[in-house]
Image: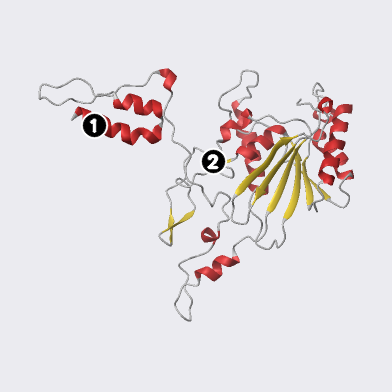
């Protein structure tokens, strides 16, 4: 019986990681007086770490704009009594693709004590010119430029916008630099106070929810939008975490009907690209770099470029 239990534990533990399988399979224990072996719990050593679940299934409603979550499926036609679900769902379906270009500001004077004095360096101004030329060379009809209200982002925007005449610019505090979420693994050279994660994290999450989602249903043509901001903000947006499909509190489709899921938990699970948000600090972005996200009408997300500076000469590249 002990051997059979070990096999069952090994079979069930495959999804939990090799370390979990190994220590489950060998934990058969000592025989009891009655004859059968009594399984005993054996804790894995510290180096094995806690078993963590693998990636879940794709959550099509990561931006809360999935048509089925927006329509009342219980509403019936007063004339026929039939559910007109397909027609009403079409009303909520996006029709266009959004191309989102996330630009990190250029190099700036990091030693200035006041934010207003953290202006671009001469190299930073050159970088902004190169980024503006690169964006203009793509031949795309950009719809707008949204930028952080911090000095270095404003100056970067001013230079880039000269190469994109006619494209409107909008300033926002949501995209200001900050500490989005405590990184995993932690780093020794950067340890903000917990309150900074609490304050900045909510704001940067609000920026994600405001700007990163599938196209509005009224949008008929593909859009090309530029967001000029900061490394931490861009990295968080790329990794962005939302409420998991198995834990969210919104309405979900179950067997053709909508059902209320359990209340959301405090923990965050992947959204957008569905990569753990705590991994944001594992990414590195050069000054003036271009990150290109694509959001399809069905909510699928693709990362076409991350921190691209291949258009800059090597001696113009920096990461400060």
Q: Quadrant of the C terminus?
A: top right
Which of disc 1 and disc 2 is earlier in sequence? 1
Tags 2 and 1 in contact by the CB under 8 Å rule?
A: no
Question: Badge 2 is on which residue?
Answer: 270
In the picture, measured across the screen, residue 247 lies left or right of residue 130, that is left
Question: Badge 1 is on which residue?
Answer: 5
In the picture, measured across the screen, residue 180 lies left or right of residue 145, that is left
Residue at left 62%, top 24%?
193
In the picture, measured across the screen, residue 214 lies left or right of residue 141, that is left
Viewer can see residue 157: no
Percent position of residue 267, x then y: 49, 37
Residue at left 73%, top 44%?
101
The number of callouts visible is 2
Percent position of residue 268, x then y: 52, 39
Q: Residue furthest bottom?
A: 79
Colour basis: secondary structure
Q: How far is the residue under mark 2 from the one under mark 1?
A: 34 Å
Residue at left 30%, top 27%?
25
Residue at left 86%, top 44%?
161
Q: Is residue 60 above or below residue 292?
A: below
Percent position of residue 157, x then y: 83, 40
């Amino acid at each position: 019986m002990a051997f059979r239990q070990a096999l069952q534990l090994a079979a069930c533990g495959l999804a939990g990681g090799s370390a979990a399988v190994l220590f489950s399979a060998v934990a058969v224990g000592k025989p009891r007086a009655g004859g059968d072996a009594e399984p005993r719990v054996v804790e894995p050593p510290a180096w094995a770490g806690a078993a963590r679940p693998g990636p879940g299934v794709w959550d099509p409603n990561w931006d809360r704009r999935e048509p089925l979550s927006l329509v009342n499926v219980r509403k019936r036609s007063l004339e026929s009594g039939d559910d007109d679900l397909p027609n009403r769902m079409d009303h909520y379906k996006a029709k266009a693709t959004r191309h989102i270009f996330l630009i990190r500001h250029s190099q700036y004077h990091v030693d200035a004590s006041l934010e207003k004095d953290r202006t671009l360096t001469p190299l930073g101004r050159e970088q902004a010119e190169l980024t503006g030329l690169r964006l203009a060379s793509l031949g795309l009809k950009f719809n707008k430029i949204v930028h952080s209200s911090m000095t270095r982002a404003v100056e970067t925007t001013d230079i880039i916008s000269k190469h994109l005449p006619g494209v409107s610019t909008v300033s926002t505090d949501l995209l200001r630099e900050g500490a989005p979420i405590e990184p995993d693994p932690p780093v020794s050279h950067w340890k903000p106070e917990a309150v900074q994660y609490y304050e900045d994290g909510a704001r940067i999450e609000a920026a994600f929810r405001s700007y990163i989602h599938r196209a509005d249903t009224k949008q008929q043509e593909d859009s090309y939008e530029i967001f000029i901001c900061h490394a931490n903000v861009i990295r968080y947006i790329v990794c962005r975490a939302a409420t998991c499909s198995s834990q969210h509190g919104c309405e979900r489709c179950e067997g053709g009907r909508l059902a209320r899921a359990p209340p959301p938990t405090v923990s965050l699970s992947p959204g957008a690209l569905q990569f753990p948000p705590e991994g944001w600090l594992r990414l590195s972005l050069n000054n003036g770099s271009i990150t290109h996200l694509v959001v399809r009408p069905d909510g699928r997300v693709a990362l076409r470029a991350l921190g691209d500076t291949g258009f800059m000469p090597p001696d113009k590249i920096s990461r400060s």
